Image: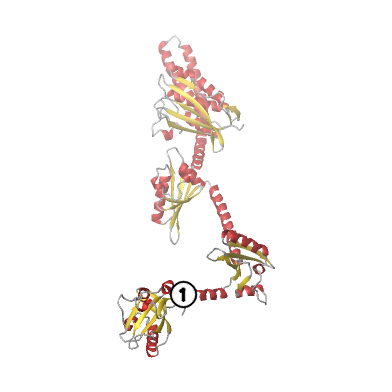
Amino acid sequence: MENTCAPTCAERVTGDACPICKSNELGTWRWERLTDRFFGSERTRVLAGLGSEPESTDAFLTRIDPLDRSLVQHRLAQMAKHPAPFDVEFCLTVGHDKRTLRMYGFPDREAHPSNPQFFGTIEDITARLQVSEALVELSLAVEQARDYVCIANASGAIEYVNPAWREKSGRQRSLIGLPVAVLLGDPQVYAEGRAEMDRSGVFRRTIRKTNGKVRHEEITMWPVRDVRGDVTRIVVISSDVTDRMNAEEASARMQEVLAGAAREWRHTVDAIDAAIVMFEPPATIRRMNRAARDLLGELGYDLIGCSIAEFALPAPWPAVLDLVAQAVDRGLSCESQVRNTSGKTWDIIANVAITEEVGDVVVVIRDVTATIEMEESLRRSEVMSAMGNLVAGVAHEVKNPLFGMSATLDAMELKFRDNADSLKYATMIRREVDSLRVLMQDLLDFGRASNLELRQVPLAPIVASAASLCRETAAARHVNVDNFVDPALGSCVADPVRLEQVFRNLIDNAISFSKAGQTVTIAARELDRNGARWIEIEVRDQGPGFTETDLPRVFEPFFTRRQGGTGLGLSIVRRMVEEHGGRVSARNSGDGGAIVRVELPAAGK
């Protein structure tokens, strides 16, 4: 065995390993046969797990694996009978480690003939065996690999080719010594690979080949360097990745199709004017469309994955969460209709979407304000049409008797003009006849057919004319009328006579509820609403305002709190405004008084 100690080694006397043993990580040992004492150097004691004191052969053998123990025991016995050098490998357990040791021994033929001694070395070959086994396994793996493996020298000449590449090349003669570029089939690929390998250490590229059909190969090259860093070998592996590339291309196409379908679905859902929200109960938003984000306002783009229960949101969201809870409790679809204080109305439907793991709730919120208003307007139109026909007939029947009464009263006043008592009664009758005449005119206006003479007209002059006609009444009650409508206010398509009557009724009504010294204010503005231009005109007074119970009824026919009023003024206003495609609403001002707002679509420029 190379690098083993000579029989005169210092181990014989001192038990310390010689420099050669130290340089080879060998341990030395000595066995006195007659005394059956086994001595070991420090390295031997570490490798074999010996104690600091000499041990017997049997004690040493107990550490050896049972499968190898009889072999070592047999060798020692042979050496005792026929002293001769021996070499044996065995497994030994030290603590939790299992090691493979190699033990070399030889007899001392010079000293102590009555007590023969034996010397030797011991080394740990566990790592060497593992490397050897790994190399065998690697060799088998490379030989049986489906990938194409080649090893070349530093100049690129082939030194090894595995069977897969030999079969792929179709060459019957040996490939050893040929350039690697021959196997790659493209000198340019090898040249680029060698340059990239020298620069970054590894070259990897997927190349596309067409020879009857498309194939994809992934070429990998990396260098094997010595301790000085010089390239000694080049390892080249070629892998057929056609199936993988085809699968990736198919997956990419599928992903694009799915992404396109998702975009189309998103655009479709976003185009729906109803708000659609998917909740993870009780209140966490998982999905929502654009209408839902708009309904949430500024928070809409930040609430995905968040619970909206912690936010103070306006209607209809509290009702939405209540409906989600009901749907989860019942496991059924739930419906509700919600109206806020400003009159907006929503229909809400909550459906539980049950899967194997999660029961989400899909909520559809539809703004039905326009539909409700249209239905109410239709009902009002039907009622008012029937009522209009009735009151128009009544007014017509009353007209002639009333005219006769007025003419008779004129004659009486002329005949009894010198009789003060008679004139007093005539004046009282005249006042009541005038009241009946006003009522008759209101009834005729209320029942008048909708024969509008529409044309594009500026609104500012119409409002100014109505205010002017009401100034005499305002002066009599010591009420101011301030018209702040800009003369440059836009136009609308309207019947100017009817619109003047609308604003005259509103201003006159505001004056009647004002006290002396108070002011009736008229203001207007243009605005954009969902891409359409509208004009708003507000008539504001400083009177007592509407009571909470009266506010929903102010536009009903014959409803009035005004002494001497007919209850038809605001009803006529609403009818005329709606005939012009507009809206009218009433509310109380925060600082006192009432506000009536007329909204009319502006004429296109």
Query: On screen, 247 above or below 561?
Result: below
| Callout 1 secondary element | helix
> Which residue is situated farthest in the right direction here?
212
Residue at left offset 41%, top offset 11%: 420
Q: From the viewer's perspective, is 153 left or right of 227?
A: right
> Which residue is situated farthest in the top direction here?
418
Residue 567 can be seen, yes or no: no
Residue 421: give x, y in percent of width and height: 40, 12
Quadrant of the rendered image containing residue 241: bottom right
Colour scheme in use = secondary structure
* Viewer-proximal residue among 210 and 228: 228
Residue 34: give x, y in percent of width and height: 31, 87
* Viewer-proximal residue among 514 and 276: 276
Residue at left offset 58%, top offset 65%: 231
Number of residues whose C-alpha sits closer than 10 Å to that of mark 1, classed few (under 14), some (14–19) or many (20 or more): few
Q: From the viewer's perspective, is 315 left or right of 602?
A: left
The quadrant in which the C terminus is found is: top right
Residue 380 can be seen, yes or no: yes
Please state which amino acid type lies under the numbered disc 1: Arg
Residue 508: give x, y in percent of width and height: 47, 24
Q: From the viewer's perspective, is 323 left or right of 452?
A: left
Query: On screen, 542 above or below 584?
Result: above
Quadrant of the rendered image containing residue 50: bottom left
- Residue at mark 1: 128
Q: How many marks?
A: 1
* Viewer-proximal residue among 277 and 29: 29
Query: On screen, 315 above or below 169?
Result: above
* Viewer-proximal residue among 564 and 591: 591
Residue at left offset 43%, top offset 57%: 359
Quadrant of the rendered image containing residue 532: top right
